[in-house]
Amino acid sequence: MSAENMISRAIVDTFSKKFMDYLEVDVAIVGAGPSALVAARYLADAGKKVAIFERKLAPGGGTWGGGMLFNEVVVQDDALAILDDFHIDHKPIADAAGFHTLDSVEMASGLIFGAMKSGAKMFNAVSVEDIVFKEGKVNGLVILWTPVQRLGMHVDPLTVISKCVLDGTGHPSEIMNLAVNKAQIQLSTPTGGILGEKPMWVNSGEASTVENTREFYPGLFACGMSANNVMGGYRMGPIFGGMLKSGKKVASLILEKLAEK
Ligand code: 48F
């Protein structure tokens, strides 16, 4: 066999096996931002089968660019243990007790590496365009290659079946919007719908991101800015303790849910 063909066959064969193996999972995660990557890591560490579907070529969501492209971010004391689990470095801010800076590129790459090393599988350049919703239950995701979607090609998608779905799509809460608008689900929010993100208030947003992380419909969870948008929390900018803690919290909620089944 020519080297050219060997390379092509190896890639197609390995990818096909990986994809086939992950068409049915315990947890299907939409979006590979910081909160979802933390969730993926702890779920995979607990032995769960986890697939992450990320629209962009590079996972990491809003972590890479720091604040206004200054590639540093801030975290609080109570999120350091999560960074330490991922072996991501941080240093205290001299005149702000309890706060630390870290390199946003190290954070993005460290979270991706940690989630994958724990066994979560990443499917990048894949957009989730719908949910599988049967007999009142969320059963999985409808997926399509992002370039196909962006070019507007008339191509049918494929599906992934899962016991739980996690919306980690950030500010737009894309999966929760699909659930409300297409499946006509009533979420466990004060209105049954999506309350919508409020403007910047750092301390409030950081606390509410963690508080708002929950199961919004049986088997349908949200973390990070998605959860905060669903519940009408304030935004917080380039401070990431709330995102990391939200990911850890949702992993433990999903583990409890899976233990019930
Ligand atoms: O927004 P994002 O980084 O998620 P997050 O974990 O973190 C928010 C922070 O980055 C920042 C912030 C903190 O101060 O406010 O914004 O809540 O990442 C969301 C990821 O989901 C992908 C998107 O490309 C991004 O990488 N995504 C969104 N919709 C879809 C999707 C979709 N329909 N299918 C696949 N991926």
Image (tube, rainbow, N blue to C red):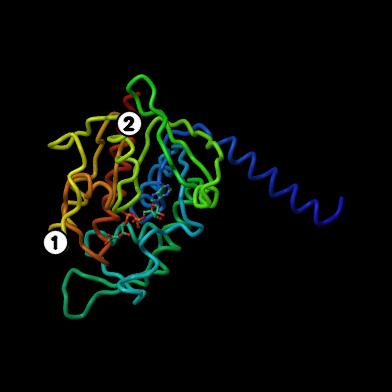
Which residue is outermost to the top?
135
Which residue is outermost to the right?
1
Left or right: residue 258 versus residue 22 is left
Q: Nearer the viewer, residue 240 or 189?
A: 189
**Mark 1 neighbour class, 10 Å CA radius: few under 14, some 14 to 19, many 20 or more:** few
Residue 61 x %, y % = 39, 58
Ligand 1 quarter of the rendering: bottom left
Q: Which circle marks residue 203 in the picture?
A: 1
| Marks 2 and 1 in Cβ contact (< 8 Å) | no
Q: Residue at x 47, y 56 (%)?
A: 56
Among the 4 quarters of the image, the one containing residue 79: bottom left
* Count of marks overlaid on the render: 2
The residue under label 2 is 219
Q: Nearer the viewer, residue 24 or 157?
A: 157
Residue 92 x %, y % = 25, 74
Q: Residue at x 32, y 52 (%)?
A: 170
Which element carries disc 1, helix, strand or loop? helix
Q: Amino acid at mark 1?
A: Asn
Q: Nearer the viewer, residue 60 or 148?
A: 148
Among the 4 quarters of the image, the one containing residue 138: top left
Residue 169 x %, y % = 35, 49
Left or right: residue 173 versus residue 236 is right
Q: Amino acid at mark 2?
A: Gly
Which element carries disc 2, helix, strand or loop? loop
Left or right: residue 102 versus residue 98 is right
**Mark 2 neighbour class, 10 Å CA radius: few under 14, some 14 to 19, many 20 or more:** some
Residue 42 x %, y % = 38, 46
Q: Which circle marks residue 140 in the picture?
A: none
